[in-house]
Amino acid sequence: MDLKTMTYIVVGLSFALYLGIAFWARAGSTKDFYVAGGGVHPISNGMATAADWMSAASFISMAGLIAFMGYGGSVFLMGWTGGYVILAMLLAPYLRKYGKFTVPEFIGDRFYSRTARIVAVICLIICSVTYVIGQMKGVGVAFSRFLEVSYETGLLVGMVIVFFYAVLGGMKGITYTQIAQYCVLIFAYTIPAIFISLNLTGNPLPQLGLGSTLTGTDTYLLDRLDQVVTELGWAEYTTTPRLSMTNMFVYTLSLMIGTAGLPHVIIRFFTVPKVKDARSSAGWALVFIAILYTTAPAVAGMARLNLINTIEPASGKHITYDERPQWFKNWEKTGLLQYEDKNGDGRIQYTADAATNEMVKVDNDIMVLANPEIARLPNWVIALVAAGGLAAALSTAAGLLLAISSAISHDLLKGVFAPQISEKTELTASRIAMALAICGAGYLGYNPPDFAAGTVALAFGLAASSIFPVLMMGIFSKRVNKEGAIAGMVAGIAVTLLYVFQHKGIMFIPGTEYLGSMSPNWFLGIEPNAFGTIGAIVNFAVAYGVSLATQQPPQEVQELVEHIRVPTGVADAHGH
């Protein structure tokens, strides 16, 4: 069976599964729509959280970034996994004990202010919209290649699929759909990696294959990769930092605390029955995530080696453009891989020197999807990867869109502007808000400002600078008041956005695009995507400073903070 037919069958069956689950688990109440009725098992919730978390950035883009950044790409591995430890230990159980539907609802109650709730909604929407663009980029990339349609058509199809199962099912439908999507994406990621590891090293475990010798030689895979990239003019794969150690540290921390502050992840911990289940869910999520994240470095290294070997053979003789492999031709059609014959000899030269490099575009986001084709794996494996990439992008997009719609319908409409509306009206408003959010995300996806993981990293920085600090202070400080919380959120996200705008241009506004990725005016050498850490420090400092200069929170609010922090059993034993 040819690849196109196989891909249509595999992707079609996976979509039918998602839609069937959404119909079976459709929401009948606002509690179903927002928190899946609050009765999801911790293991199931951990799997759904993993799917919600492992977006197009994780599945499609992260290994592509590591493939070209080498050691510098480890910021994504450390940041995106380390954040779950913070989430499990410092946020999830306390927010679950509080027992509300959304993050802005907690902020509004804890800081006894509708203004604080509105500011939190604005921050949430800014973070989530930025994040969802990366998912739409992933959908477009996957569809454009494997279904042989345009990037725009791929986006449209993805929007329709998300519309049906997210609007129909709400959090209940999304949760059980994401469990299925996790199964699809993890098999789609690991099976090709096992095949490729066996081909290159004879070791079936990619995690071990990355550190093994190449089949039939005494040369280690990473040593060979270092050799070929340096011969072509790039820095060593295994020793290249991300610009500087300071930037590496700040970038990693920004991703970690951004993970703990992202609303679509936090809201998942409101879906379990008990407080201890929230921490258990985070632990299970980390286990499920680790399967992919420990495989990603192997996928990246092997994909980079295979890519170079097929374009620049070991013999040193450049292949001609007419001799280019079939995978090369397939990806050329998408516009994500481009060749330019600069010297007119008809041969392909792939080097680090921009003046002589004829591979003028090799998009980071194609590496995972192209890897099975480059390695000449069976068509069913390639089709499975397509389904996995789409599952990753669609699962996270659904979670983000739910976070946006619940912020609009529950926090703004029900919580601020029309508290008297019925549950049925609120549910209808939620679905309308979800539909509008999908349309808005699709529009922004047509003009993505960056590769998927780059845009997602920026979203993490915005969450780190705005939402994470106010949650931490809301749980662990009785002294921070409404004035401090509002001022901190505004200051944190404002300084981060200003820094990003200065160095990257204002996203989505033509003519203001990137001013250069190595701007000499970077603060302490910190790149814009890593600036969330500085924004978080500003947020904490401003919030505490303003709180100390104004009145203490009311006594009942201070008692609420104490109640949130005391374990349920202890509280019950003391009659609280």
Image (tube, helix red, strand yellow):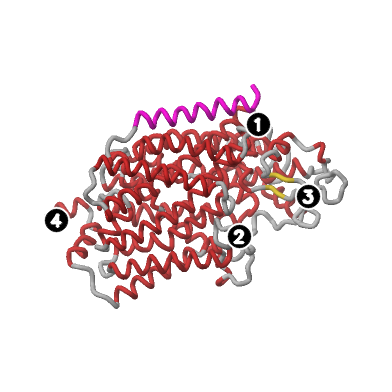
Mark earlier in primary sequence (2, 1): 1
Could you say where residue 81 lies in the image, as x and y percent from the top left? 47, 51
Looking at the image, is mark 3 or mark 2 nearer the viewer? 2
The quadrant of the image that shows the C terminus is: bottom left
Rendered view: 86 above or below 44: below
Tell me if I can see residue 179 in this picture. Answer: no
Classed neighbour count for the residue bearing mark 2: other residues with Cα under 10 Å, few (<14), some (14–19), many (≥20):
some
Cα–Cα gap, marks 3 and 4: 71 Å
- Which amino acid is tagged 1? Leu
The quadrant of the image that shows the N terminus is: top right
Question: Mark 3: which secondary structure?
Answer: loop
Would residue 117 appear left or right of 16 to someone viewing this image?
left
Q: Which mark is residue 358?
A: 3
Dots 3 and 2: beta carbons under 8 Å? no
Q: Which residue is mark 1?
A: 377
Question: What range of the chain is rendered magenta?
Answer: 1-25
Looking at the image, is mark 1 or mark 3 nearer the viewer? 3
Mark earlier in primary sequence (3, 2): 3
Q: Which residue is mark 4?
A: 576
- Residue that sits furthest to the right in the current view: 345
- Which amino acid is tagged 2? Glu
Cα–Cα gap, marks 3 and 2: 25 Å
Report the residue at 25% width, 67% height from top: 478
Report the residue at 86% width, 51% height from top: 343
Q: Which residue is mark 2?
A: 513
Classed neighbour count for the residue bearing mark 4: other residues with Cα under 10 Å, few (<14), some (14–19), many (≥20):
few
Could you say where residue 565 lies in the image, as x and y percent from the top left? 25, 58
Could you say where residue 366 lies in the image, as x and y percent from the top left? 63, 43
Question: Mark 4: which secondary structure?
Answer: loop
Looking at the image, is mark 2 or mark 1 nearer the viewer? 2
